[in-house]
Amino acid sequence: MCGIVGYTGTVPAAPVLLDGLAKLEYRGYDSAGIAVAEGGKLQVVRRRGKVAELAHTVGHFDLTGKSGIGHTRWATHGRPSEANAHPHVSCAGDIAVVHNGIIENFADLREELSQRGHTFRSETDTEVIAHLIEETYADLSKGASTTSEASGLLEAVRLASMRLVGSYGLAVMSSKEPGVIVTTCKDMPIIVGKGSDGAYVASDAIAVIGATRDVVFLKDGHLARLTCDDIAFFDGYGKSVTEETTHISWDMDVAEKGGYPDFMLKEIHEQPRVIRDTLKGRLVAGHLEIDELDMTAEELNLIDRVYIIACGTSYHAGLIAKEQIEGWARIPTEVEVASEFRYRNPIITPTTLVVAVSQSGETADTLAAIRDARIKGARVFGITNVLGSPVARESDGVIYTKANKEIAVASTKSFLGQLVSLSLLALLLAQAKGKMRMNQIRLIFRELGDTAEQVERILADTSAIDEAARACVDATSALFVGRGMGAAIAKEGALKLKEISYLHAEAYAAGEMKHGPIALIDEGFPVIAIATQSPVYDKVISNVQEAKARGALVVAIATEGDKEIANHADHVIYIPKVRDALSAITASVPLQLLARSIAVIRGCDIDQPRNLAKSVTVE
Ligand code: AGP
């Protein structure tokens, strides 16, 4: 969940690191710090709070060193404080480490190192790494034998990392090897690349692509040694290896707000483009094709059970896809929160398909669930937004959502990309199983494409949404209700609202209201009802009436042309008519805007809500 960056080159490192950290801040923003090689020493500057505060402090130092490492933190072990901020240093202050991940055996290592005289200055798991490397480096300097081709800091990091249990992306420096950065990883992403002014390492390509678009995604257990002129790669045995380079094609403007007040609004407005890009090239000679899944129609036809595993918003995309896969392909489908799935004993056979949905492609629970499912013999498809991410690498096949980098912590455009990708997968399964006529599949594919223009229309006039937001803003709690597809859409609406506005929100299948939650409703209590045209429209209206009769302030998301709804709701947000199976694509957009609008009025930080981080790389 943390962001790490490193640079060694021909220009002062501090501004490069601060720029990289600002781009990585969405990964965590509890504290930030840098270490720069300065006159034979490592100068460490750390601050609690955001990167801007660190930048302000760094301004008081005259840092001219041309190599350094930096970190922006989402606290796991130890509260957000300057002492717990990275980089962490060894006893002598000559080794500095930044870390993304969790060291599970840190307590044992800390105990062991303390007994050998190491002094700890933080509550973090990371600090043990600096002390372990310090010790190993000292042993090597005294001539300890090693069988690898590596030496010095590289070998010290290699040997020390063999003692670590858990997950890590590391960047390490030593004052004894100025201009050298060593990096390694396990279950956490590390990207390295060579620009015209030096070598870069980061936990996300966004911090590197200003310098180079040709990057290496470091393999688990491998290491890289960066110097101003060169990047050398090694495997876990310390043997020199050649790594494959990947070209990153997304535009640099993903890192800019482009005139919008926040990334979330910018990303909401990108959704029509995401829908179009995700569909591009999928209908070939009248047939659906998703070659990346690498499965024949015969193999797809054999699938008799689907599990969709994901977390948060991605889980909600799964709930919506369940309706499509069961409705169109007639395959029984379960949707499970990855953190639960990984500790259950689900029934998996060779004809089970597991679909892992993750925007970041890094979510620890989803990754663990993928591994578990593969061990049990399932075929795993990943749906992710990040090229070369762990989910992409560890799945048998992958569909990319074409959302481009998403910066706001609240997922919006990647969610729509997931909905479209999962719709395609459901149609593909229906095609392979012969459960729908081809002209019906082509019709739905066309209608999927039409949602891009329908979302554009929703975005063109948001006045009704803003008015509803103003009506809800003083509430302390809200209920989101719907039935069928609407029940899943309601869950995503509630998550968006609580995530960015800090208003308590709950989602219920509307028919469940009278079994408990209706007790919450009194005068002016907001009930947001997904009341689009569907086979259960009349039932939703009855539930809305029940809420209204108890004084609720009803905001309805309804289909254009529906006059009836205005008789029951205080605020109606109309959206274009789509078939029920695709309604999540359009109905989610006003809910995103409603949450944002309420959060803006409440003065919340839209892109970086408290306590959250974009990638949840810890269990
Ligand atoms: C969405 O707004 C949230 N930030 C969060 O629920 C997110 O969807 C979840 O953490 C899963 O992330 P992933 O898609 O990257 O796996």
Image (cartoon, helix red, strand yellow):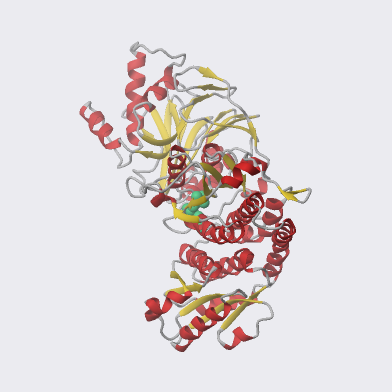
Residue 293 falls left or right of residue 6: right
Q: Quadrant of residue 163?
A: top left
Q: Nearer the viewer, residue 273 or 203?
A: 273
Q: Quadrant of residue 563?
A: bottom right
349, above or below 237, in the image: below
Q: Is residue 600 visible?
A: no
Q: What is the residue that sits farthest to the left in this orientation?
A: 115
Residue 426 falls left or right of residue 188: right
Residue 188 in picture, x, y percent from top left: 47, 38
Residue 309 in picture, x, y percent from top left: 48, 51
Q: Nearer the viewer, residue 545 or 539?
A: 539
For the point 46% across and 32% down, the residue is: 185
For the point 55% across and 44% down, the residue is: 381
Residue 521 in picture, x, y percent from top left: 41, 81
The total number of labels drawn is 0
272, above or below 301, in the image: below
428, above or below 46, in the image: below
For the point 46% across and 18% down, the residue is: 238
Q: What is the residue that sits farthest to the right in this orientation?
A: 285
Residue 454 falls left or right of residue 15: right
Q: Is residue 371 visible?
A: yes
Q: Nearer the viewer, residue 170 or 575?
A: 575
Residue 409 in picture, x, y percent from top left: 52, 55
Q: Nearer the viewer, residue 366 or 13?
A: 366
